[in-house]
Amino acid sequence: MFKLSDKILLLCVGEAGDTVQFAEYIQKNIQLYKMRNGYELSPKAAANFTRKNLADYLRSRTPYHVNLLLAGFDETDGPGLYYMDHLSALAKAPFAAHGYGAYLTLSILDRYYRPDLTRDEAVDLLKKCIEELNKRFILNLPSFSVRLIDKEGIHDLEKLMPVGAK
Amino acid sequence: GDHCVGIRGTDIVVLGVEKKSVAKLQEERTVRKICALDDHVCMAFAGLTADARIVINRARVECQSHRLTVEDPVTVEYITRHIATLKQRYTQSNGRRPFGISALIVGFDYDGTPRLYQTDPSGTYHAWKANAIGRSAKTVREFLEKNYTDEAIATDNEAIKLAIKALLEVVQSGGKNIDLAVIRRNQPLKVTSPKSLVV
């Protein structure tokens, strides 16, 4: 997870090396925008900037094979989540997931997500997803780090470590 | 006016510039002479504003580029050297003219040391405890030479007062036309007018 600005986080998964290289490049460019213009890019603008970069590299000799989730809080638009895959498709979504775990978690999210979730309900929904993975996913994933973004900024929540299923 | 003063305190660095008085129909805030290069470094300049924009942009890009490759923020000396090297290249290249600005670059290195550097169009740079650039730089520097003592910069407020007093030597219209920029250790740049800072 990379902190692009005070209120934007970028989660970057995929090819080893590509993830860090691409994410840090985007991170520094977002900071450069802040220095040049005196204010930070909005989450929507940052997402589109990232998409453009990923798309440009896609048809070069050096494409980045990464899947991204960009989360941010905008003063006017409120919280926003953006899903981006390695082919540079961008979609604003109420919930999203990448990887094999997505096959399991997306159905949980589909069933239990409501647009008016409170902060605690949202964290509980995340826990539900992880419990489902713990139960049904072939790989053992012992520990998840969780971050939350609100109008105050980015907050680190407690690590989620599901106990072994019976 | 084109006056600019920089003071290196013990826990604070101060930049003061004279704000050009605007014409009646002109909007005020379109000309900023103090610019942040990064969260911990800023610079003020005297000379051709248009040239300054180019130099500042290159410095800003270099600050981020340095963070990307080296995973550390620039030291004030590094970015000053980068700007100075850029300026020097333009004194020795085909078909180009030198950048018409002198710059005062202030900030804190990541070990906490405050720094103040000055560059000029030739591409030389030097470190200073306090300095002035611009039209009547000599007058201001003489004032600073007389008044820069360890007591004068003992506290943050004293350092700010010294910067304001130095500028008032040459600024005609008094306090209204002075812009101040202050960086305290581990804190971001603050650009304000003198009233709100000094107790």
Image (cartoon, grey):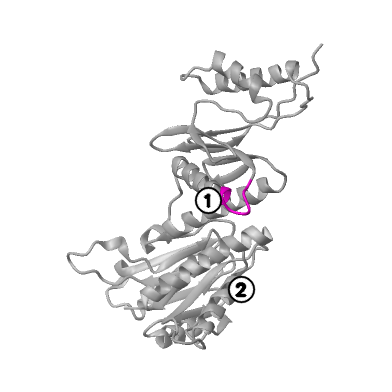
Mark yes or no: residue A2 visible. yes
Location of residue B69 by image quarter: bottom right
Which structural element holds mark 1?
helix
For badge 1, the amino acid type reads Asp
Q: Is residue A60 left or right of residue B142?
A: right
Q: Is residue A70 left or right of residue A161?
A: left
For badge 2, the amino acid type reads Glu
Tell me the quarter of the image containing the N terminus of chain B. bottom left
Picture coordinates of residue A33 (x, y %)?
Answer: 47, 55
Marks 2 and 1 share the same chain: no
Residue displayed at 78% across by 21% down = A138
Packing grade of label 2 (10 A; few <14, some 14-19, many >=20) is many
Packing grade of label 1 (10 A; few <14, some 14-19, many >=20) is some
Query: How many callouts does the rendering have?
Result: 2
Return the residue nearer the eye: A7 or B105.
Answer: A7
Residue displayed at 63% across by 47% down = A64
Q: Which residue is mark 2?
A: B77
Tell me the quarter of the image containing the C terminus of chain B. bottom left
| A62 drawn magenta | yes
Q: Is residue B126 above or below residue A96?
A: below
Q: What stretch of residues is rendered in magenta?
A: A57-64
Mark yes or no: residue B199 visible. no
Picture coordinates of residue B160 (x, y %)?
Answer: 46, 67
Picture coordinates of residue A158 (x, y %)?
Answer: 68, 29
Return the residue nearer the eye: B197 or B99.
Answer: B99
Residue displayed at 53% across by 84% down = B88
Q: Which residue is mark 1?
A: A56
Front: mark 2 or 1: 1
- Report in which chain the residue with disc 1 lies: A
Residue displayed at 34% across by 81% down = B170
Which structural element holds mark 2?
helix
Please name the predominant secondary structure of the magenta segment in the image. loop
